[in-house]
Image (cartoon, coloured by chain):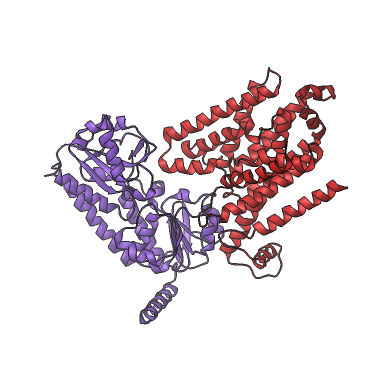
Amino acid sequence: MLRPALFLGGVALLVFSMAVSVRIGISDIGYADLGRVLGSRLGLAVEPLPPLVDSLIWDLRIPRVLLAAFVGATLASCGAVLQAVTGNALADPYLLGVSSGASSGAVSVVVLGIGAGSLGVTGGAFAGALVSFGLLMFLLRRSGLDSVRILLTGVAVGQLFMALTSLIVMASGDAETTRAVAHWLLGSMASARWDGVAICATVTAAGLFVLWSCSTALDGFAFGQDTAASLGINVRTMQNVLLVATALLTAVAVAFVGAIGFVGLIVPHCVRFLVGPLHRSLLPFSALGGAVFLVVTDAVARVAFAPQEVPAGVFTALIGAPVFAVILRKRGGL
Amino acid sequence: MSKGIRITVVLALALGATACSGAPHPSAGGDKKAGTVVRSCGQSLSVPEVPSRAVTLDQSSTETLLALGMADRMAGTSYLKTSIAPRYRADYEKVPVLSPKTLTSEQLRAANPDLAVASFAELYSKDRVGTREELKESGLPTYVSAVDCPRHSRAGMTPFDLLFKDYENLGRMFRTENRAQKLIDSQKKQVQRAASVSKKVKGKPSVVWIYSVFEGAPYVAGKGGLPSEMSRLVGAENAFADVDEQWPEVSWEAVADRDPDLIVLGDIPELGQPGDSAEDKLRMLREDPVTSKLSAVRNKRVLTVPGIEMDPSVRSTHTLGLLADEMKDRGYAR
């Protein structure tokens, strides 16, 4: 009917935006060059590009566009899920304190040099995210997963780790490090490489499938926990599965690109206007919408203030807020 | 026109000489390509031909290459912290500025360089120009100043010794050994002249080096950096030599507590934030209720130097000279 056609349209839009944005950057790439890079990788008899140009396209641009798509899909889907689980329209993927934990972890590596050799910034951020989420679940272990309690505990854990991050930066960072860390905290796609794409692709695919398979339960949660229970949903187990899945997905995304804001908050709302609140379609469309949005935003971030590159996290809100305002106006009430 | 031809001829001769002279330092790893091989910060750089498209990742590297007269062998510069020293300005204008701030991975590759030169290993990271390993794979040798990785040099080398090591290495890569040796000789003389002051110094005057003031707190020179070495050379001592960090952030009270005989202020007006120019720093010293009572402030024993020269660079001997003169003028040295 309408939905499959719409979904295919979304996929086409994603492919189109990726194909366009892969060309955009400090030096614009023609499709001929792109063909030569892919051709030489496939073992075709094409004249290879100079190694550095080849590296620009193959090692930087292509993985960056792919990573933007995976991260965008992850953030938007996690946002949609958490908005349902907590019954709060303002919920976003960073609600569980994961991004604050990740920044503490990243700062520990950058500033304090803890595990700088073995973990790296990505590993440190991921470890930090797990620690903060672990703390959250520990604090929630006895009490039920009442949505207000999840929200408040998440805020508290987030604030704790934010303070920890500031403390580490203030106590021992010199001016240069402080400025570098501030850049990371805003969220930037600049360090995208193939290893990140591989991990994100795997985690995103698996994670989104898990979330999607919980669609019915999520529809139940949307009407409140009591309704969900009366529908025969094991609320506690379901909540645990959904919280762990979204936390892991977000942790991986944050570890690779920092805390890119706005995508996970606004995209699900936009998509809800378009396809309605049922999660069976809301989740895949959110994933598509998030992917398209971040791919396009990051392309703009690459060139808007050339030769300077602006962190993508700055542009997500700059572009997203007006778009959302327009949609909100057109639709009238929520 | 005739000048252009002359340069071409000289270049051709130089290239010819390079081709004939073969490999004066064959690589231990048995690289097939003949050329210069230089050790830099844990990596062995193989430079098959004299670089003709070098790109510098920060101002100190830029000025070092300009001091060696390599302007016509540079494809670009980046990351200007402060204005270029007047004596290099004419040459600097001949080289394209790829970015006023830190270079991105795409910008570096798009410039199609055959050598990258940096003062800090940290500039080669995934979120900046990319790691040294991946650039090596794309055939780009990456030089890191010996100053930034003393553990790869003989123990006990002073920052000036390490700087001279840089001139020597770069001189070999660019086949301009004579020019490099001249630079080393002249700077060695300046160091000796400053050191001669120390013999006439009574006691051990203490010096506080203030690099910048960021959000109200001064960043001063700590242990092991160039300021400590410069203080030592002229027979003084760095008042914060006990703090085990290069540029620790301290409080104004801590500065007052050390009650230094002399205060050196770094002038970096181009950073453009309050606290970056020497004027701002001096005003803060005079207005702070505690530091305003310091004898160094009341008696105007305050020396202003270009901030960039507090970090090891080809310009640092200039500040060393200023410090030596100050020691004489203030009567610490007879």
Q: Where is residue B97 in the image (x, y as percent from the top left)?
A: 44, 61
The structure residue drawn at horizontal position 30% and vertical position 29%, both measured from the top left corner, is B253
Q: Is residue B53 above or below residue B283?
A: below
Residue B186 in which image quadrant: bottom left
Left or right of B124? Residue B207 is left
Q: Which chain is red?
A: A
Could you say which is closer to the camera, residue A182 or residue B279? B279
Left or right of A47? Residue A4 is right
Could you say which is closer to the camera, residue A214 or residue A57? A214
- Any part of residue A321 in sight: yes
The structure residue drawn at horizontal position 19% and vertical position 40%, both measured from the top left corner, is B300
Residue at the top extreme, as displayed: A142
Q: Which chain is purple?
A: B
Q: Position of residue B161 (x, y in %)?
A: 31, 52
Left or right of B92? Residue B294 is left
The structure residue drawn at horizontal position 51% and vertical position 29%, both measured from the top left corner, is A163
The quarter in which the C terminus of chain A is drawn is top right
The structure residue drawn at horizontal position 22% and vertical position 31%, both measured from the top left corner, is B293
Count of numbered labels shown in the rendering: 0
Q: Where is residue B309 in the image (x, y as percent from the top left)?
A: 31, 50
Q: Position of residue A240 (x, y in %)?
A: 73, 27
Residue at the left extreme, as displayed: B334
Residue A73 in which image quadrant: top right
- Any part of residue A73 in sight: no
Could you say which is closer to the camera, residue B186 or residue A171? A171
Left or right of A117? Residue B259 is left
Could you say which is closer to the camera, residue B247 or residue A221? A221
Q: Is residue B196 above or below residue B70?
A: above
Residue at the right extreme, as displayed: A1
